[in-house]
Image (cartoon, rainbow, N blue to C red):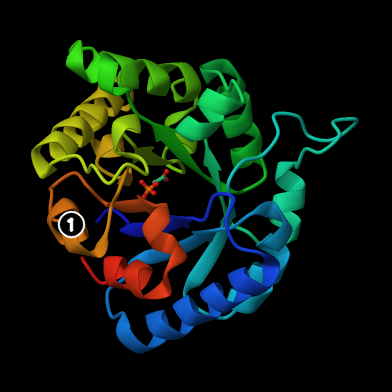
Amino acid sequence: MRKKIVAGNWKMNKTLEEGLTLASEVVNMVKDEVNNQAEVVLCTPAVSLHAVSKLVEGSKVKTGAQNCYDKESGAYTGEISVSMIRSVGASHVILGHSERREYFGESNTMLADKVNLTLKAGLTPIFCCGETLKQREAGIHIAFVNSQLTESLFHLSAEEFQKVVIAYEPIWAIGTGVTASTAQAQEMHAEIRKHIASKYGQAVADTISILYGGSCKPDNAKELFACKDVDGGLIGGASLKSRDFVDIIKSF
Ligand code: PGA
């Protein structure tokens, strides 16, 4: 059985105090209401990661960073390393989010280095991929997403690859209120799994959790999560409200 995962991506939202309130609401609601086995991860702003990690200790909720730097340590003012992330109690790192690719010029090659460091630190990368609307309209979306996976992940051994979580996030669906249809999501998730199988074999591909991201909300999570190859979600906007986020977790 593949792991079911719901990860919240808070992006650049919530002060420390607001983040602690949100996290404690999520912890309590998950404890009281959630009886499925979904793994829950809160990817907070870096400055809140330590405090939120402490707060969720002993609960079913885990924490993650939204990015890391592609070097281990040194004179890189303002950057955050994987060992720092590990040291504050987080277990996951989002890598290659489309906002980082777009606004911070993150390339597939740079992301390959980040993936390596993340795995070496014992953290779980949540590797994001996804096409623009233009690419979808041109019919090159599958090839484009496959190339993102090939260039940033396919140097890994099968053992390493099995530690990676993939998040398919069509850029046209992120923060827009436009969700991929279940048919579009299932098609791409199946293509991603097929591409992984072509490199690592079907048995490995069948163990990889592939999350959907892009305007996933309580009212569409159920049908998305019911798709055969959709193993959960990476949730932006709806992760900022505890009620919405927990309702999404309950959608399996
Ligand atoms: P959204 O963001 O749920 O607000 O569309 C998803 C993401 O960017 O991870």
Residue 155 image position (x, y, % from top left): 49, 20
Which residue occupies 59% across, 49% down? 123
Seen as rendered, the residue at the extreme front is 176
Residue 96's x, y, as percent? 51, 32
Up-down relation of residue 109 to residue 126 (above or below):
above
For label 1, the residue is 220
Q: Which element carries disc 1, helix, strand or loop? A: helix
Residue found 22% across the figure and 47% down from its top? 230
Residue found at x 54% / y 73%: 23
Q: Is residue 151 left or right of residue 248?
A: right
Q: Is residue 141 visible?
A: no
Q: Nearer the viewer, residue 121 or 151?
A: 151
Query: Is residue 110 visible to us here?
Result: yes
Residue located 48% across and 61% down the image: 41
Kind of residue sitting beneath label 1:
Asn
Q: Residue 212 appears at what percent x and percent y?
A: 29, 45
Say above or below: 167 vs 41: above
* Residue positioned most to the left: 183
> Would you say 224 lies left or right of 156 here?
left
**Which quarter of the rendering shows the C terminus?**
bottom left
Q: Position of residue 160 (x, y in %)?
A: 49, 36
Screen quadrant of the N terminus = bottom left
**Image quadrant assignment for residue 111:** top right
Q: Observer-nearest residue: 63 or 184?
A: 184
Q: Residue furthest bottom?
A: 32
